Image (cartoon, grey):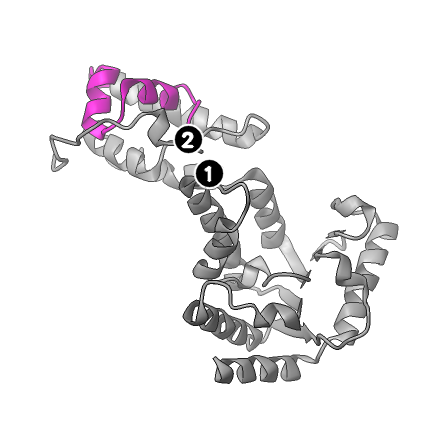
Amino acid sequence: MHLNSEIGRLKTEADEPGWEVDPDDDWGVAVVATVGRQLKLRREAVGMRAAEFGKAVGYGEDMVYKIEGGKRIPRPEYLDMADEVLGAGGLLSAMKEDVKRVSYPKKVRDLAAMEAKAVEIGVYECNTVPGLLQTPEHARALIEAAQPPYSPDDVDRMVAARLARQSVFERDPSPSINFALEEAVLHREIGGTMAWRRQLERLREMGRLRHVTLQVMPTKSDAHPGLDGRIELLKFADGTAVGRADGVFGGRPVSEPKQLRVIDLWFSTIRAQALPPRESLALIEKLLGDT
């Protein structure tokens, strides 16, 4: 075993904020309970006490019990160390993927699951770059700007969750993805000049993909339905759809055809008023030349 024998001060609950299981997340609760039970069975099978095991992996005894009892989400490195200490041959480490998904907020995970099934995705953003198009630096800057501030641990989880959604671009067959955003968003250098340049480069790169359209709404355009906030529209292969818009139906997700027609009309109106994709990319090119 190549783990350091002296891990130093053992990590306690105070050192590991933000890793509680959401009690309303039934799937997450079940996964964490199953992982905890496997950890306990493995530890007991080799005759190791919780305190002894905790010292070996760098955690306090109380944290070991909480993780084994399904009360805390184990970190990936915890599972790796447990796998090595308990000689599990990779079985405990293999649980990292499911545990990683649990660590993402349920709301984000549910959205990612719907995006993974959609054949057509439409997103309009009034105040920010759409999350599917954000660079890691940009996503972190936005999340860290929240007040009251999130803990560093929560920031890491939220950034990871947002970036994980971007796997939708790697799907085969590819969904049709349509973005519309306000020109004013492109002039706010969030994160500093170089970070913002990388974000503009990301927009240019994604806007050139054959299954992606990116349109910019000029600042001097007339009023349009999206000025109240964000609009999302996901359409699926079976003809069903889910949509939401900040300015209608209380901002709640809707799936009734009558309500969806309103959201579809709003998004179509915005796209009709926005610059065409070619002109939108030309604007981004110009901004890159100015930075």
**Residues rendered magenta in the picture:** 45-73
Residue 103 is marked as 1
Q: Can you say which quadrant of the picture contains the N terminus?
A: top left
Mark 1 and 2 residues: CB-CB less than 8 Å, in contact?
A: yes
Vertical order, 113 against 132 (above or below): above
Q: Where is residue 153 shown, x and y percent of the image?
A: 41, 40
Q: Earlier in the sequence, mark 1 or mark 2?
A: 2
Q: Where is residue 38 shown, x and y percent of the image?
A: 35, 24
Image point 58% across, 72% down: which residue? 187
Q: Element type at marker 1? A: helix
Residue 73 is marked as 2
Q: Element type at marker 2? A: loop
Decide if residue 268 is on the left or right side of residue 100: right
Decide if residue 62 is on the left or right side of residue 177: left
Q: Nearer the viewer, residue 36 or 207?
A: 207
Vertical order, 140 against 106 (above or below): below
